[in-house]
């Protein structure tokens, strides 16, 4: 691999690290924040399943991002990733759970504007619509699961301590599922822009199975996310788990599960094809925001409890972050593209 | 991975042991109450009988066992960071239940050391008061068990605790009045009143714990 290609890929890896530090923190944030799962265990499980999700099921959402802006030059992809990674890093530093999805979409729009490429407004509208639907859906799912679980627990008369042990195990399972879904859904943000220009070639493993160039790309992206989880996600985990609403371990589990279901729904090619085969409208395979899903889930539980305990000022701050982030990232991306084009004479588009 | 699996297995076995410990602790509270009832009856009927001292010694052993179990539960809850949201409530509950066992034991010791002279005319009333107090604590034991398994029943069981506490107050007032209306010397009246009051206080403590349990169960159900 050429050194320049490696250098440009570093932009994607930086974004992967940001995703690990912020978005992945959402998956186990409620579990770690409520001290039901310790950080080390959360980080190990999260890393393993993010990588698996990325490599095994990451292709679906990548196509959608590709449609939004088919970035076809490495310097362009680099600029988008660095812009998104930098803006997510800034938000992470201020403790705001933002979304890498929103950042990368903002960066791609910036690339489209800078290069004069046409923007597919149909795809853009679909993405924006899912950003609104995602937290609402997560909130509704969490309300449904919470009510069902409460009734089940009341009827089954489980001992408090046994319930605690089951909740811990369930949090780990839901977290693993969430991490897998996050890897599948969000790897497109990290490595999607490099798919059309992947520097790797397919590897045939003992004539048994083939690791495609895209899977190799997703694997290193997944590893970058894992590094982000281990090195920088602890603070965000505690923010997510405590700031918005004081959560009980059971609520923490319900929120992680509903978040995971939403992410999985928007990443599963299988479910989408199944719905199409039944002549039902297919779920758009869009990289949604894990932050939005988690916050939607938390607010859903908050509503169920009367809404008084939700810190609406924090919710408002987070929402403003969601609106501001894509715009800031778009501006940063255009600025980096400008520097690469006019100061380093690099082609950001072919 | 194997480390995680082992820790999961350990978590479930620890949980079972803790459940057993808590059940055993509540059993001790219940048994100490029953033993106290027998002790008062034995004291009043055969105060010179050696059996009384053996029974008091047995209560002391049970109290000491309850202390050990409380410490084990406390360590396990902290070390394994179990029930983070209800831990402080459970620990406070165990502490207060332990105090209740201590009150039973204290009463036994006072009978053993001070040997109050209850005239026969007060025996039935004192036994009646003791039985009400023990019934009150029995209801508290049910409330405690329901707090761990069935929060919806906490209020119902706590209501029984309140009922017996009121009964106990009535019996205490009646007995105290009878003591002070009697022809005994004032020093003996004061001495007997001290014992009657100490027994009645067990019910007050039980009612306070039942009230706490209602709050804890509301916290858990929210």
Image (cartoon, coloured by chain):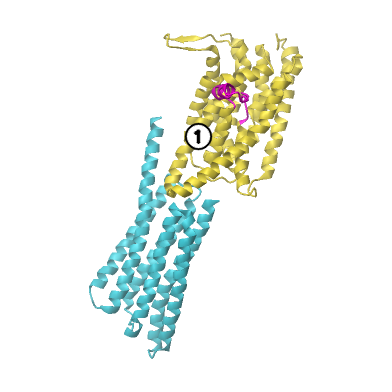
| Depth order, front residue of B53/B176 | B176
| Depth order, front residue of A344/B200 | B200
Residue B170 pos. (x, y %): 45, 77
The image quarter containing residue B187 is bottom left
Residue A333 visible in this rendered orientation of the protein: no
Q: Measured along the vertical axis of the image, is residue B125 above or below residue A239?
A: below
Residue positioned most to the left: B50
Residue B4 visible in this rendered orientation of the protein: yes
In this figure, which residue is indicated by the disc labeled 1?
A174
Rendered residue at 50%/23% (across/down)? A52
Residue A44 pos. (x, y %): 48, 30
Residue B118 pos. (x, y %): 34, 82
Q: Measured along the vertical axis of the image, is residue B37 above or below residue A233?
A: below
> How many residues crowd mark 1 within 10 Å: few (<14), some (14–19), many (20+)?
many
| Depth order, front residue of A310/A221 | A310
Q: Measured along the vertical axis of the image, is residue B115 above or below residue A259?
A: below
Residue A85 pos. (x, y %): 64, 25
| Quadrant (top left, top right, bottom left, bottom right) of the N terminus of chain B | top left
Say whether residue B12 is magenta: no
Q: Main secondary structure of the magenta part?
A: loop
Task: Identify the chain of the residue marked 1, using the numbered disc in the image.
Answer: A
Rendered residue at 55%/10% (across/down)? A200
**The magenta segment:** A266-289
Left or right of B47, for residue A269: right
The image quarter containing residue B121 is bottom left
Rendered residue at 47%/61% (across/down)? B156
| Depth order, front residue of B77/A315 | A315
Dot 1: element: helix
The image quarter containing residue B179 is bottom left
Rendered residue at 44%/60% (across/down)? B143
Q: Chain A's shade in the image?
A: yellow
- The chain coloured cyan in the image: B
């Amino acid at each position: 691999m050429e050194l320049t290609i490696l250098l440009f890929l570093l932009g994607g890896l930086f974004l992967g690290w940001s995703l690990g530090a912020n978005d992945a923190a959402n998956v186990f944030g409620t579990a770690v924040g409520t001290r039901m799962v310790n950080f080390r265990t959360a980080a190990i499980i999260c890393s393993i399943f993010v990588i698996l999700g990325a490599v095994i099921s990451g292709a679906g959402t990548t196509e959608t991002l590709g449609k939004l802006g088919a970035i076809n030059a490495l310097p362009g992809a680099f600029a988008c990733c660095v812009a998104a990674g930098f803006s997510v890093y800034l938000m992470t530093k201020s403790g705001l759970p933002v979304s890498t999805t929103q950042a990368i979409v903002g960066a791609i729009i910036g690339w489209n504007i800078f290069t004069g490429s046409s923007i597919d407004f149909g795809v853009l509208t679909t993405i924006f619509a899912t950003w609104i639907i995602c937290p609402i859906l997560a909130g509704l799912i969490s309300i449904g699961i919470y009510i069902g679980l409460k009734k089940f627990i009341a009827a089954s008369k489980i001992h408090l301590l046994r319930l605690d042990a089951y909740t811990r195990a369930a949090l780990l399972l839901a977290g693993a599922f969430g991490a897998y879904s996050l890897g599948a859904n969000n790897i497109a943000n990290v490595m999607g822009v490099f798919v059309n220009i992947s520097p790797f070639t397919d590897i045939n493993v003992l004539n048994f199975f083939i690791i495609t160039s895209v899977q190799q790309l997703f694997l290193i992206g997944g590893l970058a996310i894992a590094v982000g989880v281990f090195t920088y996600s602890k603070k965000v985990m505690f923010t997510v788990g405590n700031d918005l609403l004081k959560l009980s371990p059971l609520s923490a589990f319900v929120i992680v599960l509903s978040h995971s279901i939403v992410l999985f729904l928007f990443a599963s090619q299988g479910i989408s094809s199944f719905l199409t085969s039944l002549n039902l409208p297919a779920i758009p395979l869009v990289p949604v925001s894990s932050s939005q899903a988690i916050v939607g889930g938390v607010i859903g539980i908050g509503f169920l409890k009367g809404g008084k305990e939700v810190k609406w000022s924090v919710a408002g701050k987070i929402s403003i972050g969601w609106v501001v982030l894509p715009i800031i990232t778009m501006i940063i991306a255009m600025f980096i593209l400008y520097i690469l084009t006019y100061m380093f004479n690099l082609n950001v588009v072919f | 991975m194997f480390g995680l699996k082992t820790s999961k297995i350990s978590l479930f076995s620890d949980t079972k042991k803790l459940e057993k410990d808590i059940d055993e602790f509540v059993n001790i509270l219940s048994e100490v109450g029953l033993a106290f009832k027998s002790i008062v009856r034995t004291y009043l009927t055969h105060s010179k009988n050696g059996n009384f001292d053996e029974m008091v010694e047995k209560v002391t052993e049970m109290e000491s066992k309850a202390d050990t179990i409380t410490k084990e539960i406390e360590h396990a809850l902290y070390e394994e960071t179990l029930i983070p949201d209800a831990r402080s409530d459970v620990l406070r509950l165990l502490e207060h239940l332990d105090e209740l066992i201590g009150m039973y034991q204290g009463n036994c010791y006072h009978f053993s050391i001070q040997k109050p002279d209850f005239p026969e005319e007060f025996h039935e009333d004192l036994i009646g008061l003791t039985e009400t107090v023990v019934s009150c604590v029995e209801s508290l034991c049910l409330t405690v068990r329901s707090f761990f398994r069935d929060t919806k029943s906490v209020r119902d069981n706590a209501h029984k605790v309140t009922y017996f506490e009121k009964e106990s107050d009535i019996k205490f007032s009646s007995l105290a009045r009878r003591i002070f209306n009697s022809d005994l010397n004032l020093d003996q009246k004061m001495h007997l009143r001290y014992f009657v009051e100490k027994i009645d206080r067990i019910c007050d403590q039980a009612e306070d714990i039942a009230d706490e349990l209602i709050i804890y169960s509301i916290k858990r159900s929210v």
